[in-house]
Image (cartoon, rainbow, N blue to C red):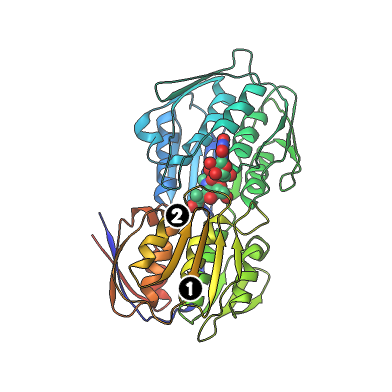
Amino acid sequence: MADFIVNGRSVLCGEVDIHGAKNSALPILAATLLCNSKCTLYNCPELSDVDAALKILKYLGCKIHRQCDAVEIDPSNAFGKEIPDFLMREMRSSIVFLGAILAKCSNALLSYPGGCELGPRPIDIHLNSFKKMGVEVDERFGSINCQCCNGLCGATINLPFPSVGATENILLAAVTAKGTTKIHNAAREPEIIDLAAFLNSCGGKIQGAGDSVITVEGVAHLHGCEHSIIPDRIEAATYMAAAAATGGKILLKNVIPDHIEPVFYAFREAGCDMEIGENTIKLTAPKRLSRIKLIRTLVYPGFPTDAQAPIMTMCTVARGTSIFIETIFQNRYKHANELLRFGANIKVEGRVAVVEGTERLYATEAKATDLRGGAALVIAAMCAEGVSRITDIYHIDRGYQSMEKVLTKLGVDIKREV
Ligand code: EPU
């Protein structure tokens, strides 16, 4: 397993081109299954989660040709209905394939994705929504067997929580279902809009993506299309946090600033100066950051849970006390324990974390416990005095393309040790 070795006290300075969004690419890759001809995706990030999604598509019968960030998928002979356990385990979000397989084959057999490093990841909202569309669900011995002998039917679905994955799964199931589906309390994340845009380019009829009510008029067939994945708003927020924590200056290129707007207030409150362009964000950090009074993670357009960990590292070196309330996931503070090893002062009580800023962090060995938490540790190592080792960086590779190359270009002394 690889580690990152980071020589600290770096000041991050320079330009970075943001890659395509992991959380857009994954459901769109699942969506390609529904088409009757070849799809080409551009700006598709090179990540281990994307590799896992492509392995699933291949297993189901797709032909795949990948060249850097362009991926061609030919699903015309893909009629696989089962995803085996070893592939489901490679990526927790593989559950998004369920809607696509059901839409294509009217039945599906998947092993249960189970819990993960962020706590339990139930899929009750997904399965209850499918039941409303006429699916019989049989869950036993860790697998989910879904059948809809008469095909999927449109339905009115009221989500108890605007789950991102459930909204995506319903879109995939509904786009070629008989009749009209209405999703109330739908997730509004930019990745939902991107998935709907892809499906509409393939001939789907989806209206209202990005709002709380989405209407899907089922169509008979979808054809292939060319689509460019939106830029990754969380990758952007992470590199902004890295620049802010190290007192640096960064120009992000290839971003959609509107998507990142929910985190702007945190950077401004911390004393950073930001210039927002059409597709760029320039952030200049002060010598020492100020505390951020309160960060409460919320569904979009609230503060994203995925940016909580990297921004927590910023607060560990800020002047004053910052408070975090994590409302989306039950167990998303594992990085806090690892940050203590750097000398950070953090107290966690349930969903609340209190961060008392300190002037200096010290190098240590720390273990990435999850994707965003791993990124938070790399930022801490960049701030710390001395040479740190971050282990278990396979978590980071799931969602940050060549992080060490990006950071080296920005002046950080970091290397991957295998
Ligand atoms: N939930 C349920 N039942 C369900 C579905 C969700 O109780 O059937 C709960 C979850 O347990 C969680 C909350 O609802 O506590 C939010 O879950 P949601 O379904 O909205 O999230 P997701 O689809 O599993 C996606 C992203 C996550 C991101 C969340 C929230 C992908 C592949 N993953 O997960 O991204 O944190 O939305 O925005 O899109 C990451 O990139 O690091 C990451 C974890």
Identify the residue shown where x is 40% and y is 42%.
Answer: 52
- The picture places residue 218, in percent across and down from the top left corner, at 72, 28
State the residue in front, 314 or 94: 314
Query: Badge 1: how crowded within 10 Å, few (<14), some, or many (20+)?
Result: some
Amino acid marked by disc 1: Glu
**What is the residue that sits farthest to the bottom in this orientation?**
287
In the figure, residue 414 lies in which quadrant? bottom left
Residue named by callout 1: 356
- Measured along the vertical axis of the image, is residue 93 above or below residue 354? above
Identify the residue shown where x is 54% and y is 85%.
Answer: 286
- The picture places residue 213, in percent across and down from the top left corner, at 76, 40
Horizontal arrangement in the rendering, residue 200 relative to residue 334 (left or right): right
* Image quarter of the C terminus: bottom left
In the figure, residue 389 lies in which quadrant? bottom left
Residue named by callout 2: 399
Q: Is mark 2 within 8 Å of ligand 1?
A: yes
Find numbered disc 1 in the image and state the secondary structure of the residue it sits on: strand
State the residue in front, 79 or 216: 216
Query: Badge 2: how crowded within 10 Å, few (<14), some, or many (20+)?
Result: many
Identify the residue shown where x is 65% and y is 63%.
Answer: 262
In the figure, residue 21 lies in which quadrant? bottom right
Identify the residue shown where x is 33% and y is 76%.
Answer: 362
Find numbered disc 2 in the image and state the secondary structure of the residue it sits on: loop
Horizontal arrangement in the rendering, residue 166 relative to residue 238 (left or right): right
- The picture places residue 239, in percent across and down from the top left corner, at 49, 69
